[in-house]
Each structure stands twice: as structure tokens, then as C-alpha cells.
Image (cartoon, rainbow, N blue to C red):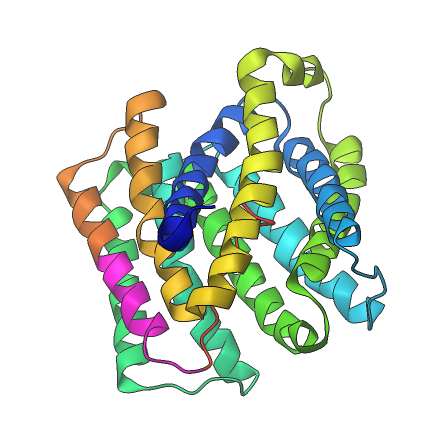
Amino acid sequence: MFGRYRAPILFGLMSLIWGLSWMATATGVRAIPPLFFAGSRFVVAGLLMLALHRARGGALHIDNWPRLWLIALLSSALTNGLMFWAVQYLDSGIGAVMNMSLIPLLLLVVGVLYRQERFTARGLGGIALGFVGLYLLFPPTGPRFADPQALAGAAGIVIGTVCYAWGAIMARPMLVAQPPMLLGGYIALLGGVILMPISLALEPMTNLARLFEPPILAAWLFMVLAASLIAYTAFLALLRDWGPARAGLYSYISPVIAVIAGALFLGERITAIDVLAMAVLLLAAWLAGSGRPGYVAPVQGERP
């Protein structure tokens, strides 16, 4: 339909959606319980992804259920439970840059531990720059360091990204035998199944009716339909047509969109030091993530 412009259009749409998804997440979790917002979104998105896979003639059989449950716990439940919780206390733009820049760094570290990667001078330089970027965002004399909630939010982003990298490395062998749409659907669904009872047990449900307020419902539907189905499907098409390195370039575009959206629509304040820190973090991500044959771009279909 789009001819030669199909791939660039899909890439632009995917980058835009995943950049805006952080604003949608912040809008939702600041109104209703974050684990409920995440869990309900993943249950519905997972079911829709599996239904789409089945409608295309795919089977729903999958191998190694114990490993799949562990991947879902790490990549979906813990990752997104922590990140959705963190965005309550940390600007969505800052969270997006931290998350997307740390993914290549942590994939490298976890991949080395699993003997799927090896350290290089370039990768070690990226890791060192990553620490510099985080220091610039949270200097000991800065206001974020003095704010316990902002520090807790930053810790949630970092720990959640560690869980995602760990789950992604564990998922690589399963992607050899299982279609990505099938695997992604199960990871989202099982992650939601894990999160929902935890939410019902720990979170107050007094504000749950706010889910049906137009801005909150729009944010929830955006995460289900746009972030999971449209952007994830676009990523799979680009992964097939462009390969992981080129398709993964959204990691350097979506954070910029997230920062601009947060500033324009959520009133988030970005300083010159923040801009410098983000540039350092994105450079660190490029150093750690580029030039590695085994590098697989992060898949955001089941995440914020």
C-alpha cells in the first residue's frame, strides 16, 4: 500500500507511539493504581496479540512453560510493575531516557554473564559513560537526589530495566523456535496474570472508577492498542525487513519524543544539565549497543 515508503512510515509511527507511551503511562498511573493499570493492560494486550496470531493461522502451542513463566515474571511483571510505579514519582521523559539508554548497557552486562556477549573496549566505554549520565541526572547536590520519591522512582527504573534485560536474554533461545508475536502475547498475558492479584491484594481500589474518565481511558486504550498492537507489529515488520540494528534506532528517537511530550503536556521541567545527561546516556547506549553481531534491539510491545 505504501510502496517504498512503507518501512519509513512504520518506523516513524513506531518511534512516535513508543515515545508517547511514557506520557500515557504517567497519565494513567497518577490517577489509578499503577499495578492495576499495568496488569489490566497486559492481560488485554496479550489476549489480543494471541488472537491476532491465531487469526493469521498460527498455532498457540508453545514449548518450555516454566521458562516462559520466568521470562514473563522478569520481562513483563517485574519490569513494568516497577516502571509503572516509578513514573508516579519521576518525570516520564527522564524515565524514558533512563530506560531506553540503559537497555543496551544492561543487555551487554547480562549477556556477558550468560556467555552470549563479550566485553569490548567500546562496550566498557559505554558502561562508564552510562554512570556519568546517571550522575549528571542525580548529582548528590541536586534536587532529585534530595527527593526520596524521585530517587525511589529512579531505582525502580534501573531495577526494572535489569529485569527486562535478564528476561530478554533468557527469551533469545525461545525466539529461535517460537514466533515473536506468539511469544510476546504469552509474555504480556502471563505478566498481567501475575500483576493483577498482587494489585488487588496490595493496592487501594478506591480510585478505580477513574479508569473510565476520558483522559485515563484514552491513555489505557493507547497502551493496549497503539503501544502493544500497532507499534509492536510495526517493529516485527521492521525487524524482518531492516534487521535488529536498524530497527532498534527508535531507542534514540522515542526518548526525545517522550521528553518533548512530557514538557508540553505534563508540565515536566527539563534543565540544560538534564539535556546534557540525556545526550551522554544516549551516546553510552550507542557505544554499548552498536557493532555487536549478537545485539538484539529491545522489543517494547509488552512494556511502557
Q: Can residue 297 be seen at all in this image of the molecule?
A: no
Taking depth in this image into account, of 144 and 49 the one nearest to the observer is: 49
Q: Position of residue 179 (x, y in %)?
A: 69, 66
Residue shown at the point (61%, 43%) measured from the top left: 229
Q: Image point 65% across, 52% down: which residue?
A: 76
Magenta stretch, residue numbers: 280-293
Instruction: Say how many tags the image has.
Output: 0
Residue 254 x %, y %: 36, 46
Q: Which quadrant of the figure has residue 135?
A: bottom left
Place of residue 69 in the rendered image (x, y in percent of width and height, measured from the top left): 78, 61
**262 or 291, which is in the foreground?**
291
Task: Kindly identify the residue that appears in the image at 21 percent across and 43 percent down.
Answer: 274
Q: Is residue 14 above or below residue 287?
A: above
Q: Position of residue 204 (x, y in %)?
A: 71, 23
Near-viewer residue (191 or 58): 58
On screen, 206 above or below 258? above
Q: Is residue 116 left or right of residue 132?
A: right
* Residue at image point 65% right, 63% down: 180
Q: Is residue 93 magenta?
A: no
Q: Main secondary structure of the magenta part?
A: helix
Q: Is residue 269 left or right of residue 227?
A: left
In the picture, measured across the screen, residue 262 lies left or right of residue 173, that is left
Residue 37 visible here: yes
